[in-house]
Image (cartoon, rainbow, N blue to C red):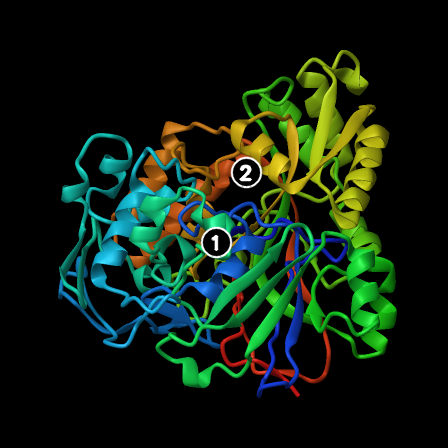
Amino acid sequence: MRNRIIALTLILALAAVVAAGCATATKPGGKYLRYSAGTEPETLDPRKSTGSPEAVIEAQIFEGLTVMNAKDAPVAATAEKWEMSPDGLTYTFSLRANAKWSNGDPVTAHDFEYSWKSALDPALGAKYAYQLYYLRNGERYNKGQATADSVGVKALDDRTLQVTLEKPTPYFLSLTAFHTYYPVHRKTVAANDKWAADPKTLIGNGPFKVTAWIHNSRLEFAKNEHYWDAAKVKMNKMEFILTDSATTELAMFENNQVDLGGNVPSGEIPRLVKEGKLRFDPLLATYFYCFNVTKPPFDNVKVRKAFTLAIDRAAIVRNITRGGQKPALAWVPPGLADAAPGSDFRKTGGDYFADNDVATAQRLLAEAGYPGGKGLPPVTLIYNTSEGHKAIAEVVQEMWRKNLGVNVSLANQEWKVFINSRTKGDYQVARHGWTGDYLDPMTFIDMFVADSGNNDAQYRNHGYENLVRRAKETNDQAVRMGLMHQAEKLLMDEAVLAPIYYYTNAVLVKPNVKGYVRSITGLFYFKEAYVE
């Protein structure tokens, strides 16, 4: 998100949080969940999606070999069991005999083989294809250097999937719970390239199915009666509200039209906390501004550093977001283990710069040839439509004016346009947020390798690539973590991004919403959720 990224979470408002979710225990005619999912999804094809809003929706209608439990550990899902070879390179998954698609067809190992290989197919253009590079020859196939038959995923029979990796990957089972690893229904996909946009052809294998999609308004779900664990699905239906307006969401919440959401106007946070309507949960995510390192003036590292250092993060979290966020002075957020038992990657790595270091920022901008901002080419900061992103952008705009003498223009864009602008590098500075896809620092570190579909900075550095590659080639935790710390330092030294804060997950939730599972990666599973 995913992760994902987020990723992560790209639609958060003033509290700068990813929308969270809860569900409903339902008997026929009983209550059901109304969840505010944020913006209109870019796509619900799990092979193509990259955003947190899409990932939460997909987690209800699709299911991987594994799923993350309440302790953020991968557990059996569509696969009932698996075996791993002693060298950690080969996994053999046994699928459930009663796993079915929402149209009643059996879910087979062939579906997973097809889905993973099609996600790697360069013709699909999946931005998250690199998440499948862990498979033997996955990267080579995606780059046109190998055949699909050589990729390390093979259906031995309908219920047995054999997976061969390039290198031992300690977090591989967590990856199989990620949306890029979900299966898709081959017959439907082959027949209609728009299959994921129409409820009639949006066939999944998860606990729910989409019954209606009123664009920019809502998604309606029904229980998937063919789901292998349907007996545990308590709701007969759900409704996801699609709005990127924090004001609208709060009004719907307080008018009992929404049961759960996370797009919160910051000015209302103290009241909502006092009234017990708002809770704060951990979230493995960083809010940041991304520089396009190929576009002037941000092709100059000193300019990027100056803009990074001239932001007062403490003021932003104190006065704007007001949701318990922490100023981010590095890339990888807290909450991920380092090599030593009980250690945290962020605490071990420490901070990489000082917050609001105006004197250094002014010196660097002058050294870049723009003293007091004079002569600097026009600069535009883009953000996706949201009251929260707008408020933060306006504050940072003023900080850059005051601290650097720079006048920056702001431009808000609708979600799909915004994602396209970032992906194509059609911007100078862009709002961004990334939520970890799995519980390892690599979910942040490999985002900026050259071939990552999420490398919106257009960053290219052979030294960085080498550090990431070496970290992926070893199972020695001390060596892995050391290499990732070096990679993060290089990323910060080159100011590829300007971290702003580490997220919290602010959740508007009614007291009668029960039974949902929330992951620190921002995903919500509503399978066993209900509304009393």
Location of residue 95 by image quarter: bottom left
Secondary element under disc 2, as helix, strand or loop, is: helix
- Amino acid under disc 2: Met
- For marks 1 and 2 on the same chain, the one whose residue lies earlier in the sequence: 1
Residue 298 point in image, percent of width and height = 62, 23
- Disc 1 to disc 2, how far (Cα)? 21 Å
Proximity of marks 1 and 2: CB atoms separated by less than 8 Å = no
Looking at the rendering, which quadrant does residue 308 occupy?
Answer: top right
Please provide percent x and percent y for residue 11. Answer: 66, 50
Residue 322 visible, this angle: no
Q: Position of residue 483 (x, y in %)?
A: 37, 46
What amino acid type should be assigned to the residue bearing mark 1?
Answer: Asn
The residue under the point 60% across, 71% down is 238
- Write the residue at 43% across / 27% down: 460
Q: Looking at the picture, does residue 315 appear above or below residue 66?
A: above
Q: Position of residue 299 (x, y in %)?
A: 57, 20
Residue position marked by numbered label 2 in the rendering: 492
Q: Residues within 10 Å of mark 2 (few under 14, many from 20)?
A: many
Q: Which residue is mark 1?
A: 3
Q: Secondary structure at mark 1?
A: strand
Q: Is residue 281 left or right of residue 317?
A: left
Tell me if residue 522 comes above or below residue 452 in the rendering: below
Q: Nearer the viewer, mark 1 or mark 2?
A: 1
Q: Residue at x 82, y 31 (%)?
A: 403
**Which picture quadrant has residue 32?**
bottom right
| Image point (49%, 55%), residue name | 436
